[in-house]
Image: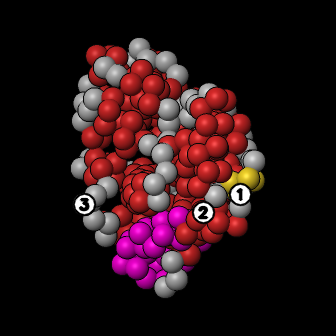
């Protein structure tokens, strides 16, 4: 099995999980707990690790400006304990998926089959060195198939994300520098990355200048060395994310992609990702 399978799986599965960061149900649930805006995002995603301090969130979320992580705590834990945040997030995922996919899809045999395969893949992941994955893996599994699938995909994307951060650190990049290299490859507009992660124009320019000094950038464009480095980062990330797909094999990995693709497409075409992200 080629390591590019990990990238293909991530791209197909991600919308099924990622809608939670844009869901109005999630935003409302977090407001009901007394927390507004990105504080709810940081609290709900980090809650599986327990009532950690801001420094832990900054370390595990990596590419956000540290001030954003610190700003959320301890206010979020004073508003509600981690278990309440976990319950609120799962409840928002339930309402969101029912709204986005409809009752027929939620009750379909395809959801159940996809959930079964995805859970086997997630169960093959090892927690060592992957703190966000480990936190989420410690949670009880939901009962409903559409939520089993959502939780499994959450585990798989946090497993991949933890590995990605390890690769970025091994390349000597800080959070802002990692975003600059990401923006330079053209997949996401730099202005979006900069604003949603809380970096100022000055901080972004300083990170770009450091990359230019390393020979990775010329102005806003990547050099050949920078392009090669980004490819190396993405390739190594894929390699570190292969364990679940190797465990279930090509046939089941392909089947999972085929089963989830219509659900992910429906979510993407719903317009939910046009909402203000958390």
Marks 1 and 3 sit apart, C-alpha to C-alpha, by: 34 Å
Q: Locate residue 25 relative to residue 265 in the image: left or right.
A: left
Quadrant containing the C terminus is top right
Residue 250 falls within the magenta-colored stretch: yes
| 109 relative to 87, above or below | below
Seen from the viewer's position, the closer of residues 24 and 112 is 24
N-terminal-most mark, 2 or 3: 3
> Which portion, as a residue range, is magenta?
233-258
Residue 263 location in percent, x, y?
Answer: 61, 57
Residue 274 falls within the magenta-colored stretch: no
N-terminal-most mark, 2 or 1: 1
Residue 181 location in percent, x, y?
Answer: 63, 52
Mark 3 closeness class: few <14, some 14–19, many ≥20 residues within 10 Å = few
Q: Secondary structure at mark 3?
A: loop
Name the residue at 65% across, 51% down: 212
Mark 1 closeness class: few <14, some 14–19, many ≥20 residues within 10 Å = many
Q: Are marks 1 and 3 in contact (CB under 8 Å)?
A: no
| 237 relative to 250, above or below | above
Q: Locate residue 153 relative to residue 52 in the image: left or right.
A: right
Q: Are marks 2 and 1 in contact (CB under 8 Å)?
A: yes
Mark 2 closeness class: few <14, some 14–19, many ≥20 residues within 10 Å = many
Name the residue at 58% across, 65% down: 229
N-terminal-most mark, 1 or 3: 3
Name the residue at 60% across, 63% down: 230
Q: Which residue is mark 1?
A: 222
Q: Which residue is mark 2?
A: 230
Q: Which residue is mark 3?
A: 128
Q: Please identify, in this view, whether the residue under mark 1 or under mark 3 is nearer the observer.
A: 1
Residue 76 in view in this figure: yes
């Amino acid at each position: 099995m080629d390591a590019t399978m990990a990238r293909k799986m991530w791209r197909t599965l991600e919308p099924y999980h990622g809608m939670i960061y844009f869901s109005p149900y999630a935003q409302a649930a977090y407001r009901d707990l007394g927390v507004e805006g990105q504080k709810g995002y940081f609290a709900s995603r980090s809650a599986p690790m327990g009532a950690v301090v801001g420094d832990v969130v900054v370390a595990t979320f990596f590419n956000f400006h540290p001030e954003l992580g610190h700003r959320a705590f301890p206010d979020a834990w004073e508003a509600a304990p981690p278990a309440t945040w976990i319950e609120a997030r799962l409840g928002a995922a339930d309402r969101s998926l029912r709204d986005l996919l409809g009752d027929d899809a939620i009750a379909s045999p395809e959801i159940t089959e996809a959930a079964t395969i995805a859970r086997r893949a997630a169960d093959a992941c090892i927690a060592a060195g992957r703190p966000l994955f480990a936190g989420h893996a410690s949670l009880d599994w939901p009962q409903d198939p559409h939520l089993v699938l959502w939780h499994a995909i959450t585990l798989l994307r946090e497993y991949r994300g933890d590995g990605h951060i390890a690769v970025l650190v091994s390349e000597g990049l800080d959070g802002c520098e990692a975003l600059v290299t990401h923006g330079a490859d053209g997949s996401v507009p730099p202005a979006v990355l900069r604003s949603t992660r809380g970096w100022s124009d000055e901080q972004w320019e300083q990170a770009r200048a450091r990359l230019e000094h390393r020979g990775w950038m010329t102005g806003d464009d990547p050099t050949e060395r920078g392009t090669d480095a980004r490819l190396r980062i993405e390739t190594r990330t894929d390699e570190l994310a292969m364990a679940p797909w190797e465990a279930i094999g090509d046939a089941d990995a392909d089947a999972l992609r085929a089963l989830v693709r219509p659900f992910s497409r429906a979510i993407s075409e719903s317009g939910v990702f046009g909402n203000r992200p958390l």
